[in-house]
Amino acid sequence: MPSFWDHLDELRSVLIRCVVAWAVCAVAAFCFRDALFAFLFAPAHPDFITYRVLENLSTFNSQLLSTFNSQLSTISFINTRLAAQFTTHMQVAALAGLVIAFPFLIQQVYSFLSPALYPNEKRAAGRVISFGTILFLCGVALNYLIIFPFAFRFLATYQVQPEVVNQIALDSYVSTLLILSLVMGLLFEMPMVAWALGKAGILEAAWLKQYRRHALVALMILAAVITPTGDAFTLMLVTIPLYFLYELSILVMPK
């Protein structure tokens, strides 16, 4: 029978392996600077995939899109602090390393906890981890492809006067993108939170069904806060996935 100290040694080994894996992936991401920041700054370019798709779907409004593209192409980025570019590079590389190493980190944590679980609990834990990870990545992808590009389009081209030229600070751009990605990733965990609350007896599917209309209004308000673009199209693009997650929360509730 393993003692407490044996478990502590095993936990220390797991933590060391996780830190080493994260560090290796972060160093690798740091070395691929051009590819890393090309990915981060893609939404700032007029030829970003979302803008191209929108242009193909909106031929009837090509003049508006042409004006927008010309405005977006004039946006420049600035750095006002001596070490900001290097520290931003390190921070982004560390985060990218965490994302790359995430499957390994989850596997290590699961391998440490699994001996204490019953067979049915192991299967349930595996499904929860897999499903939760997929939902988080879907939220990050939605932000990268839809929410942030439209928010950036609006905020970067908005001017109170023509004389006031927009020059976006490097740390402002990167932090906004990363924070929005984290927020959307966490919001997409709504079904998992509902499932956990249902398991604990705190929440019931009947209650979620009863307040569907209220939830829709609340999600639309939340979508309006997340996307400050002010247009109905972007609001719809954010509200629909969030409401779908609400319905999914009802389906996954324990019976």
Image (spheres, helix red, strand yellow):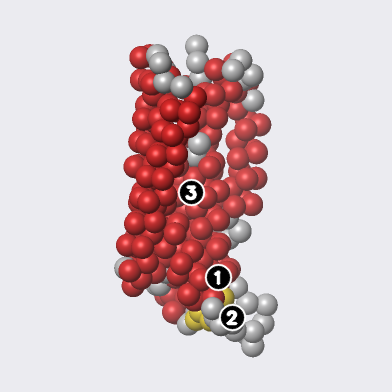
What's the residue at 56%, 82% (across, down)?
82
What's the residue at 48%, 75% (across, down)?
86
**Disc on the earlier residue, 1 or 2:** 2
Of 119 and 231, nearer the camera is: 119
Question: Residue 81, which numbered label?
Answer: 2
Residue for badge 3: 237
Q: Is residue 154 left or right of residue 97?
A: right
Of 31 and 211, nearer the camera is: 31
What's the residue at 43%, 75% (across, down)?
69
What's the residue at 67%, 77% (across, down)?
160
Q: CA distance from mark 1 to mark 2?
A: 10 Å
Q: How busy is the neighbourhood of tag 3: few (under 14 within 10 Å), some, or many (20 plus)?
A: some
Q: Judging from the image, what secondary structure is the residue with disc 3 in?
A: helix
Marks 2 and 1: in contact by CB < 8 Å? yes
**Disc on the earlier residue, 2 or 3:** 2
Report the mark closest to the observer, 2 or 3.
2
Q: What amino acid type should be assigned to the residue bearing mark 3?
A: Leu
Question: Residue 227, which numbered label?
Answer: none
Give residue 162's position: percent from left, percent from top. Answer: 62, 85
Q: Answer yes or no: is residue 143 visible.
A: yes
Q: Quadrant of residue 125?
A: top left
Residue for badge 1: 171
- 136 vs 206: above or below: below
Q: How busy is the neighbourhood of tag 2: few (under 14 within 10 Å), some, or many (20 plus)?
A: few
Give residue 241's position: percent from left, percent from top. Answer: 48, 41
